[in-house]
Image: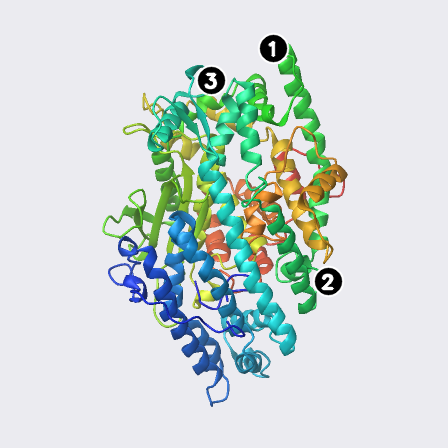
């Protein structure tokens, strides 16, 4: 992290700070001490520490910024840009822990703190970015005739700082600056409210099953986990289907009770979409208006143009061109998939027309019929703990990394475990925190987070990275058995963690995953490919009861079915990505989110049997922060790179080719944002990626002339 965050994260200038809150900041304002370059004291933090800790940290940061901006010496890289890299260390530490509580330890008491702090942090960000004296110093370094004498990484940092300030409004007149600051503070409140509404629906709006007959078709491991979830909620002789993706998707895949599938599906897709105080639709409309107004003030046609300027895609038009090139092939494949599933339903005498709550259920039947592959036959081999070991093993084979338990590191919850990471020479690299289970107060989904970025411009500071999931915690003594999709997600997030751990840069602002959104998903998506390798499955995919390895014939069937259901997967994603882009290209016109979603999907020809992966009222990627706003396309852009990179490993003879893995580590994982990501990819691959590899990878026809 670095306290001077990119646009859209946090930020005071035109708003006075409230009086310092009385209270004890606890351990939050202390230096991180102990081994591994110091670690956060997560076991001693309390919610009441955050307000006073932020008071101290914000005051310290203001003093550091003031000293840089008012330095009487002529601006240089060292006294301006390097000084900014040193500034805000205390604020970084407090924000790192605050982020952990926000995403994994949210309570009603914490949410009240969050509502108070988010506008203050948004205002602080604007105070820094609108500081004229500071911007003049940054511009002087960036525009200096002798800038080329700087190290290339220093030149990159100068460019990043200058463009971040310009894009945040550093060159605006005072009235426009004031309006941008007001917009950012209001958006911070809206984002927090959106997230809290969504979390409340996920925590409270669950499905309770009281009749064992309603569990027909569900794997025993899922039933046990649902019973354990009911126990945790104080319910006896019951099973709870949590309102999160990792619980809902397997239920929709295997539950024979069609009426119950519909109930679970409707509950899941309606998150954030209930009339009343938790309705996210009015928040969406206001967020869109404010983003459009801010973009106009900053000199951009739309929010989408502002967001994409420094991404690999550069323009919304290029991102749309990619999505629109893939959309027709995805729709055509969906039609084939629906026809296959309808034939199965008709043959069974189901007497139904396929609906969205049937798609996964009948897809599993088709998968079994076409490829003799039953998801329930896979799950006994896909245990969480062996797969975690498999991730570590693959990282060792490829990059020489070694993971060993670090039980002395304090954690925020008993479910969290920590490993020390060393390289092949035995040198400490960083720490890996793993928080795998769902619980009240933890947001749904899976994600990677960096508690501290790697850097070395003054001294070696190792990274602290985490992976977070929402698997249902099993009954004591029982294993956690994963679906294939959940196993892929596990490897996906670990790819982000490797990106942070393998970083070898000088400045924290350029470190690890601090890269454009449409590049950051390359390491995560490529890391999914190692899950499917026979070398890994043969070692770690073992039956939880017999200990026998996954049969080679079953591995072969997995590979054969790798492109199965790609119409569904691509269409549900692309629908969300296309609506995200169109929303943010709409400018300042008023948007009714429900009508827009309905009408835009009709225009696109969205199949009636599928819903968007993220309907607008729960689309946290784009409405819980700036995050992926006008950027959800990034997964497809990065997957274009991923498919091409995967072909590079295949051409080299396999995914464990050490020479190519080292080239990948050197040019992609270790470089952070020290150069243009397109240049990094060319250094790895020898050329730019084309779209043909993506189409081949998904089993779609490759149009003539497509490269």
| In-image side of 470 versus 689 (left or right) | left
The Cα–Cα distance between marks 1 and 3, rounded to whole angstroms, is: 20 Å
- The numbered dot on residue 255 is none
Check disc 3 and report the residue beneath it. 214
Q: Is residue 698 above or below residue 648?
A: above
- The numbered dot on residue 301 is 2
For the residues labelled 2 and 1, say whether their Cβ atoms are less than 8 Å apart: no
Check disc 1 and report the residue beneath it. 348
SS for dot 3: helix
SS for dot 2: loop
Circle 3 crowding by C-alpha within 10 Å: few under 14, some 14–19, many from 20: some
Quadrant where the C terminus is found in the figure? top right
Work out whether mark 2 precedes mark 1 in sequence or the reverse, and give the earlier one: 2
Q: Position of residue 302 (x, y in %)?
A: 70, 60
Q: Quadrant of residue 24?
A: bottom left
The Cα–Cα distance between marks 2 and 3, rounded to whole angstroms, is: 53 Å
Residue at (62%, 44%) from the top-left corner?
616
Work out whether mark 2 precedes mark 3 in sequence or the reverse, and give the earlier one: 3
Residue at (65%, 78%) from the top-left corner?
173
Residue at (57%, 44%) from the top-left corner?
279
Q: Quadrant of residue 166?
A: bottom right
Question: Is residue 707 among the parts visible in the rendering?
Answer: no
């Amino acid at each position: 992290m670095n306290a001077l965050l990119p646009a859209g994260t946090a930020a005071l200038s035109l708003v006075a700070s409230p009086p310092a809150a009385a209270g004890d900041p606890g351990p939050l304002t202390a230096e991180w001490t102990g081994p591994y370059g110091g670690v956060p004291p997560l076991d001693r933090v309390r919610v009441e520490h955050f307000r006073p800790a932020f008071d101290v940290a914000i005051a310290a940061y203001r003093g550091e910024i003031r000293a840089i901006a008012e330095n009487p010496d002529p601006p240089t890289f060292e006294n301006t840009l390097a000084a900014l890299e040193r500034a805000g260390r205390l604020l970084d530490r407090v924000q790192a822990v605050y982020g952990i509580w926000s995403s994994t330890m949210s309570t009603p008491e914490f949410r009240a703190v969050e509502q108070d702090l988010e506008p203050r942090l948004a205002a602080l960000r604007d105070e820094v970015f609108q500081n004229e004296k500071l911007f003049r110093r940054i511009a002087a370094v960036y525009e200096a005739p002798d800038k080329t004498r700087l190290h290339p990484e220093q030149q990159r940092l100068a460019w990043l700082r200058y463009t971040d300030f310009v894009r945040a409004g550093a060159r605006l007149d005072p009235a426009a600056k004031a309006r941008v600051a007001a917009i950012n503070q209001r958006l911070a409140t809206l984002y927090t409210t959106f997230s809290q509404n969504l979390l409340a629906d996920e925590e409270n709006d669950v499905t309770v099953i009281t009749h064992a007959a309603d569990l027909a078709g569900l794997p025993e491991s899922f039933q046990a986990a649902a019973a354990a979830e009911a126990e945790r909620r104080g319910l006896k002789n019951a099973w709870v289907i949590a309102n999160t993706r990792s619980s809902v998707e397997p239920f929709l895949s295997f539950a024979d009770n069609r009426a119950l599938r519909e109930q679970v599906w409707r509950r899941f897709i309606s998150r954030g979409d209930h009339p009343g105080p938790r309705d996210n639709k009015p928040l969406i409309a206001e967020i869109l208006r404010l983003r459009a107004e801010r973009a106009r003030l900053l000199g951009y046609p739309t929010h989408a143009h502002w967001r994409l300027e420094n991404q690999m895609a550069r323009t919304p038009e290029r991102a749309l061109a990619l999505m629109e090139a893939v959309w027709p092939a995805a729709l055509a494949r969906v039609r084939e998939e629906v026809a296959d599933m309808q034939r199965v339903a008709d043959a069974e005498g189901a007497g139904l027309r396929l609906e969205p709550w049937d798609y996964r259920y009948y897809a599993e039947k088709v998968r079994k019929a076409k490829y003799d592959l039953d998801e329930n036959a896979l799950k006994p081999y896909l245990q969480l703990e062996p797969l975690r070991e498999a991730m570590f093993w693959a990282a060792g084979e490829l990059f020489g990394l070694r993971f060993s338990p670090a039980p002395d590191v304090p954690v925020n919850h008993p479910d969290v475990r920590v490993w020390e990471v060393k390289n092949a020479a035995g040198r400490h690299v960083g720490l890996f925190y793993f928080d795998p289970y769902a619980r009240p107060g933890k947001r749904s989904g899976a994600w990677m987070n960096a508690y501290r970025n790697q850097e070395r411009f003054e001294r070696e500071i190792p990274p602290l990275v985490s992976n977070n999931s929402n698997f249902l915690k099993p009954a004591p003594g029982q294993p956690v058995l994963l679906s294939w999709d959940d196993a892929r997600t596990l490897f996906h997030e670990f790819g982000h963690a490797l990106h942070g751990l393998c970083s070898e840069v000088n400045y924290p602002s350029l470190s690890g995953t601090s890269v454009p959104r449409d590049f950051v998903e390359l390491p995560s998506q490529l890391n999914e490919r190692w899950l499917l390798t026979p070398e890994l499955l043969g070692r770690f995919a073992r039956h939880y009861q017999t200990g026998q390895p996954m049969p080679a014939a079953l591995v072969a069937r997995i590979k054969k079915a790798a492109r199965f259901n790609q119409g569904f997967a691509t269409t549900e994603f692309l629908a969300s990505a296309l609506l995200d882009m169109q929303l943010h290209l709409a400018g300042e016109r008023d948007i009714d989110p429900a009508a827009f979603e309905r009408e835009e999907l009709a225009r696109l020809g969205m199949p009636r049997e599928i819903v968007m992966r993220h309907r607008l009222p729960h689309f946290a990627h784009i409405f819980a922060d700036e995050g992926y706003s006008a950027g959800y396309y990034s997964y497809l852009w990065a997957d274009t790179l991923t498919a091409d990179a995967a072909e590079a490993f295949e051409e080299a003879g396999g995914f464990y080719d050490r020479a190519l893995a080292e080239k990948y580590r050197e040019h992609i994982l270790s470089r952070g944002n020290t150069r243009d990501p397109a240049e990094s990819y060319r250094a790895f691959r020898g050329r730019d990626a084309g779209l043909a590899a993506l189409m081949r990878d998904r089993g779609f026809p490759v149009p003539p002339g497509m490269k």
